[in-house]
Image (cartoon, rainbow, N blue to C red):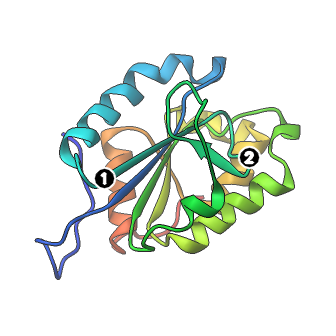
Amino acid sequence: GLFLPIEKEKKEQKIQVILLIDNGGWSMTPYIQAVTKLFSKMKRRFAHDLKTYYYHNTIYGGAYTDEQRFKYISIEKLLNFDKKHCVFVIGDADMAPYELSEGSLADWRRLKNRYQKMVWMNPMRESLWRTGITLNILRQTVPMFMLSPEGIEKAVAHINGRGDEVPG
């Protein structure tokens, strides 16, 4: 099953989710099936309250509204939603160091500052995380959890303020 964030005080309250998916590059290819499965479950659960965007490796001033990455929207539009949205980033965060520019890193920070309930779900085995330069920079910016049932449970606990500590 998929564990989804809930608010203790207002269980009836609508949960609004922004999903940012890395859907490009060879390093994400082994994880496409898991990401597709998670996406389809989230789409069914949050049919009207799910906003899905795509990027390749990192965001460059914005993201795309379509899987083919043709329809671009700016970071300002992404930052314009209600700050109560829960944001799930799905991607391996592993790229060539030059791809993670200062501007891109600043955009991730802006998103994290706007959406306090933001987590990064990484499909790579956690034992491989230490080897990625960009991965380690990004996990210092956005709390990162493994894309697994246990990792999702930990991420949701973190979003709901029940996580023991920020992963690191």
Q: Amino acid at mark 2?
A: Tyr
- Vertical arrangement, residue 80 with respect to residue 75, above or below: below
Q: Residue furthest front?
A: 71
Q: Nearer the viewer, residue 126 or 62?
A: 62
| Residue plotted at (65% across, 21% down) | 25
Q: Position of residue 89 (x, y in %)?
A: 51, 48
Tell me residue 93's x, y (percent): 65, 40
Left or right of 120? Residue 86 is left
| Kind of residue at badge 1 | Glu
The residue that mark 1 highlights is 153
Reading the image, the residue beneath label 2 is 60
Label at residue 129: none
- Relative to 17, does residue 27 appear above or below in the rendering? above
Instruction: State which quadrant residue 7 falls in.
Output: bottom left
- Identify whether 156 is placed above or below 100: below
Q: Is residue 156 left or right of residue 23?
A: left
Q: Picture coordinates of residue 131 (x, y %)?
A: 73, 36
Q: Earlier in the sequence, mark 1 or mark 2?
A: 2
Q: Is residue 104 left or right of residue 50?
A: right
Q: CA distance from mark 1 to mark 2?
A: 29 Å
**Residue at horizontal 22%, vertical 66%?**
6
